[in-house]
Image: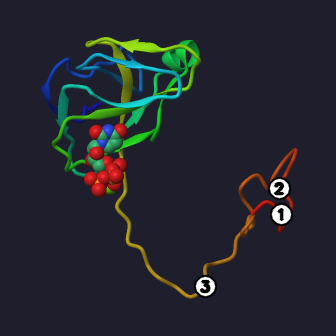
């Protein structure tokens, strides 16, 4: 399979921990202590150039989430193909203990995906569908009733 090439400046270069991993780990370039409930925009020290038609999505690491309650405020963050700045991660400590991030720690993972650019066409009325306008918990146990909790 031909591999898509993504140019990188800075270090450590994002890396896949195992063959078959979807996410490549990215690292903190600075130290920060996150108090419970606190968030911080943490630099990774790397910038990338994605080919047109691709984006990189910045996802939380499940280990940090499970062990320390560390997540990403805007998960998944979107890195546009045209962005040449440093990738930053908006970490949030949802846990009950302060959490110290050291330079070099793996703080997030980026998933590179093909993305479509579509043409938005304004119309008066949308075509019908089985779901219709039902959403926001309309199916299954505890389903939101029509007209309530909107
Ligand atoms: O987790 C993230 C999300 C975004 N970015 C960078 C890359 C992205 O291309 C740029 C803009 O992101 P986005 O479009 O999500 O933010 P915005 O609030 O809409 O800012 P802008 O007005 O610059 O588009 O910020 C990151 O470094 N990390
Ligand atoms: Mg934007």
Q: Ligand 2 lies in which image quarter? A: bottom left
Q: CA distance from mark 2 to mark 3?
A: 25 Å
Q: Residue at x 85, y 52 (%)?
A: 143
| Closer mark to the observer between disc 2 and disc 3 | 2
The quarter holding residue 69 reads top right
Label 1 sits on a secondary structure element that is loop
Q: Earlier in the sequence, mark 2 or mark 3?
A: 3
Rate crowding at label 1 as few (under 14), some (14 to 19) or many (20 or more) other CA atoms within 10 Å: few
Residue in the picture at 72% in, 59% down: 135
Q: Quadrant of the N terminus?
A: top left
Which residue position holds label 3? 125
Q: Are marks 2 and 3 in contact (CB under 8 Å)?
A: no
State left or right for residue 93 relative to residue 12. Answer: right
Are discs 1 and 3 less than 8 Å apart at CB? no
Residue at 38% across, 72% down: 119
Of mark 1 and mark 3, the one earlier in the sequence is 3
Q: Residue furthest bottom?
A: 124
Residue 148 point in image, percent of width and height = 83, 63
Quadrant location of the C terminus in the rendered image: bottom right
Q: x and y percent of residue 40 in the render? A: 37, 30
Tell me which residue sits at (26%, 22%) in the image.
14
Q: Which mark is residue 49?
A: none
Residue annotated with mark 2? 144
Residues at discs 2 and 1 in contact (Cβ within 8 Å): yes
- Residue 148, label in figure: 1
Q: Is residue 117 above or below residue 55?
A: below
| Percent coordinates x, y for residue 8 in the rendering | 15, 30
Number of numbered callouts drawn:
3
Residue furthest to the left in view is 9
On the image, the x and y values in percent for residue 87 come to 25, 34
């Amino acid at each position: 399979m031909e591999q898509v090439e993504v140019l990188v400046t800075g270090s450590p270069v994002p890396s896949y921990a195992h063959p078959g991993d979807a996410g490549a780990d990215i690292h903190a370039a600075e130290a920060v202590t996150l108090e419970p409930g606190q968030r911080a925009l943490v630099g990774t020290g790397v910038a990338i150039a994605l080919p047109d038609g691709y984006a990189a999505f910045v996802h939380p690491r499940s280990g940090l989430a499970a062990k320390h309650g560390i997540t990403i405020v805007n998960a998944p963050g979107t890195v546009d193909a045209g962005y040449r700045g440093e990738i930053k991660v908006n970490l949030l400590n949802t846990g009950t203990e302060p959490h110290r991030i050291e330079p070099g720690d793996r703080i997030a993972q980026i998933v590179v995906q093909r993305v479509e650019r579509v043409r938005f066409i304004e119309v008066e009325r949308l075509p019908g569908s089985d779901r219709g306008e039902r959403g926001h918990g309309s199916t299954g146990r505890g389903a939101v009733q029509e007209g309530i909790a909107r």
